[in-house]
Image (spheres, rainbow, N blue to C red):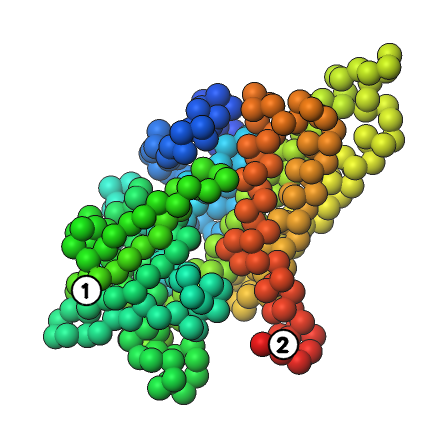
Amino acid sequence: MSAPGDESFPEIRDSVRKLCARFPGEYWRALDRERAYPTEFVRTLTREGFLSVLIPEEFGGSGLGLGAGLAVLEEVHRAGCNGGACHAQMYTMGTVLRHGSAAQKQFYLPKIASGELRLQAFGVTEPSSGTDTTRIRTFAKRVGEKYIVNGQKIWISRVEHSDLMVLLVRTAPREETAKPSDGMTVLLVDLRDAVGRGLTIRPIRTMINHATTELFFDDLEVPVENRIGEEGNGFRYILDGMNAERILIAGECIGDGRFFIDRAGAYARDRSVFGRRIGENQGIQFPIARAYVQVAAAAEMVKKAAALFDAGKPCGTEANMAKLLASEAAWYAADMCIQTHGGFGFAEEFDIERKFRETRLYQVAPISTNLILSHVATHVLDLPKSF
């Protein structure tokens, strides 16, 4: 028996559950040991149209809102799978959709919708700037009809499994702009041409199977026609993608939380110690119940943020709050699930330790909890800035 959950988009949810049943824990455990990419899982999600739900119908997608994307990713994670391998295929294309030219939309979006092209790499973070995006140093100098890019990025995931990458660069030094966020530009990099011709990729092995990398740009040439929008306005374009990213990842966290609650509840009902089921003990019941309450409350904030995004209204604060609440609810549920299972929670075959590691990421990425609190403090509560 599973705990009650969100039943919006029931047909999508049911289809995703059936798809995920074809990729059980054994599939993910094998990939985790080898740090291998879930190629077949991603191909299947793409073929059945789940990664193109946000692309308008005129470009071959389903034309649905962020709520549909949430339904897909929540069910993927609740089933014990991991959408981190491909979730960027949903939101990264938004930069092209919202700010690209008509020609760029017509050329790229249908191929992304069909799976012919993968756009699931988002190059923003740098070693020296972290989440202080206005201080990025990767610079693109325009020379005729091309940009020459030099610099470095880090924690850029799925680059080795993507055809295209949305790249944020400086085209004007920070000290020469009116505002720190000015002077940044978005380029669409064709990775098939770039690797070995100015782009070097260095994989970073981490505690989870997330295919993340460090990138080095040495005189990489990018055609001017691959610029998204106007030169110098890239930071504003990227913010749209960041809000969608945070909301969709919050949905994944809701799925993780429900995975842990489902597993803990099932184990507590079946496991007997000292002649009684452990679920009869309030010391076991109450943490499971608290996890359910926290996940259910966080899910409401996620839905609110998604509704604002789909309505085209400002949602930066709500996206941040949704990500904070959902990631913390998932992390509490993960810890509770380990504790409920005792030693068995650390066994690979139960899949809990893997999901425990995976859900911990979202306390840090794509934005840390402390930076969210800082945003709320200064932008909502009008407290003085600390940096």
Q: Position of residue 269 (x, y in %)?
A: 77, 20
Left or right: residue 152 versus residue 16 is left
Q: Secondary structure at mark 1?
A: strand
Count of numbered circles on the image: 2
**Would you name the residue on which mark 2 appears?**
386
Left or right: residue 10 versus residue 301 is left
**Taking 223 as reference, is 78 above or below it?**
above
Q: Quadrant of the N terminus?
A: top right
- Residue at position x 85%, y 32% from top? 283
Left or right: residue 34 versus residue 355 is left
- Residue at position x 21%, y 50% from top? 195
**Taking 96 as reference, is 180 above or below it?**
below
The earlier-in-sequence mark between 2 and 1 is 1
The answer to whether any part of residue 150 appears in the image is yes
Q: Which mark is residue 219?
A: 1
Extreme-left residue of the structure: 144
- Residue at position x 62%, y 49% from top? 327
Q: Residues within 10 Å of mark 1 (few under 14, many from 20)?
A: some
Left or right: residue 87 versus residue 171 is right
